[in-house]
Amino acid sequence: IVVIGAGLAGLAATRVLLKNGFTDVTVLEASDHIGGRVQSVQHGQATLELGATWIHGANGNPVYHLAEDNGLLEHTTDGERSVGRISLYTKNGVAHYQTNVGKRIPKDLVEEFSDLYNEVYELTQEFF
């Protein structure tokens, strides 16, 4: 079996195949990294995380279910299970944000950014 692409969908498909007993599976990837759009890139002194900021749609979405099965989802601040807004709380109720070198970002700064982001998100919904 050949899986085309080592993005999230390709990796999820490969995982399902292996879980179901298929052992002769080859993954082909055109780029120099796995993960598709999900990747870390260097920008000067900073490391930027790209892609998979949120998952669109929960019902029937294999990526959503893969993330859920592996405990990777956060709940939004209003308790919804959907994603699209910035969540400040993980399943255990506490989230910590850090820079790429491990320096903790103050909670008040994270909350200020989150409020601004969510406000822009709400204001732009009429365009989508």
Image (cartoon, rainbow, N blue to C red):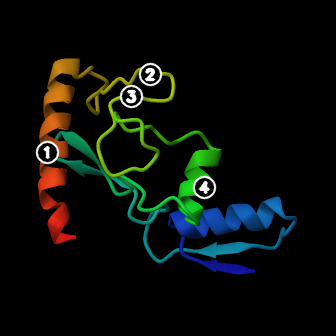
First reached walking from the N terminus: tag 1 or tag 3: 3
Under mark 4, the amino acid is His
SS label for mark 2: loop
Give how far apart the Cα atoms at labels 4 and 1 are. 28 Å
**Mark positioned earlier in the residue sequence (4 or 1):** 4
Answer with mark 2 or mark 4, whichever residue precedes in sequence.
Answer: 4
Front one among 91 and 45: 91
Q: CA distance from mark 2 to mark 4?
A: 21 Å
Residue at x 20%, y 40% (from the top left corner): 46
For disc 3, the neighbor class at 10 Å (few under 14, some 14 to 19, many from 20) is some
Q: Residues within 10 Å of mark 2 (few under 14, many from 20)?
A: few
Q: Number of marks in the image?
A: 4
Q: What distance separates the C-alpha of mark 4 from that of mark 3?
A: 20 Å
Q: Which residue is mark 3?
A: 89
Can you identify the residue that label 4 sits on? 65
Outermost residue to the right: 21
Which residue is tagged 1? Answer: 119
SS category of the residue bearing label 3: loop
Rate crowding at label 4 as few (under 14), some (14 to 19) or many (20 or more) other CA atoms within 10 Å. Answer: some
Disc on the earlier residue, 4 or 3 = 4
Say if mark 2 contacts mark 3, CB within 8 Å: yes
Numbered disc in front, either 1 or 3: 1
Q: Residues within 10 Å of mark 1 (few under 14, many from 20)?
A: few
Q: CA distance from mark 1 to mark 3?
A: 18 Å
**Is residue 127 rendered to the left or right of residue 25?**
left
- Write down the residue under mark 2: 93
